[in-house]
Image (spheres, grey):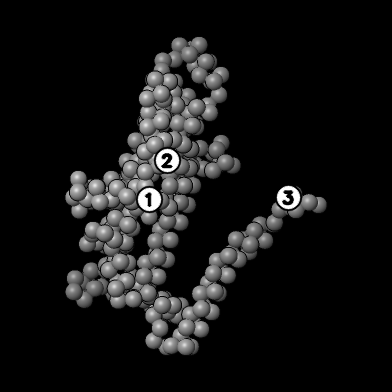
Amino acid sequence: MRLVNRHPSRRAAIVLAALPFAALALAYVVGSEIRLAANPQDKLLPAPGTIWETAVRLFTVPDPRSGELLVWQDTWASLRRLAIGVGLAAAISLVLGMAIGLLPYLRRTFAGFVAVISMVPPLALLPVLFIVFGLGEVSKIVLITIGIAPFLTRDLSQRVLAIPREQMVKAQTLGASSLVIALRVALPQTLPHLIGGVRLSLGAAWLFLIAAEAVASDVGLGYRIFLVRRYLAMDIILTYVIWITVLAFAIDWTLRWVSRRAFPWMGASL
């Protein structure tokens, strides 16, 4: 049997999926042991036990100066910014993407503009955003929004254009207006792809969030990482990195679950 036709069993699939993570963990443990054996005071690769102790302390022991659990404050601040930024980007992209895909005049007007805007590196605009919107919450949220909205808009417009023309013709034959076609024909087929696009954009959204918090903020996951880097506190930095990874995975899994529950006919492709 050809390799392209061979599929692992469920148990083998779980083992294969775990292999890269196990290899990464093993490589870290070995690297940490080598560095600590050469220099017990080395801070670059702290031992896994040290990272675990730091994580327990961060999540359970209040900060002596403020009396608060800083990791939870940072998490709430970052997730709030991420949710608002991604939510705004999704809403803007849904409306604009459907309009570009459905209406030829708007497609001629905005398709090229959105394509050019999507080529602008969002991080290059960060100083401009700080000047225009200040150093508060607005600039961070705007960075996330403009960072992923052009990509989502282009993707959704192409998804709308890919809807079979026969469906549009049948809807018009039954007397449907442009608004009805948008709401009853295009929207149900676009929403699953919107969720998929948001899932693909989350990595970039986290990048823009961390960058904005690192430059100008007094709370947030990115702010804390860049605050302790001057002390080479790798145990804290790695704890935060692992925590961000867990949060990102949880958000992605939740969106995938919502998509499969709400749009079961799209489950195989999402």
Q: Earlier in the sequence, mark 1 or mark 2?
A: 2
- Disc 2 residue type (three-letter): Phe
Dot label at residue 4:
3
Q: Is residue 227 above or below residue 118?
A: below
Q: Residue at x 58, y 70 (%)?
A: 23
* Residue in view at x 46 percent, y 85 percent: 36
Q: Is residue 94 visible?
A: no
| Cβ atoms under marks 2 and 3 closer than 8 Å | no
Vertical order, 157 against 68 (above or below): above
Amino acid residing under circle 1: Ala
Quadrant location, the C terminus: top right
Q: Position of residue 58 (x, y in %)?
A: 32, 72
Residue 65: x, y in percent? 18, 74
Image quadrant assignment for residue 51: bottom left
Q: Which residue is mark 2?
A: 151
- Mark 1–mark 3 Cα distance, whole angstroms, equals 35 Å
Left or right side of 85 for 258 = right
- Give me the residue at 29% from left, 73% from top: 230
- Residue denoted by label 1: 205
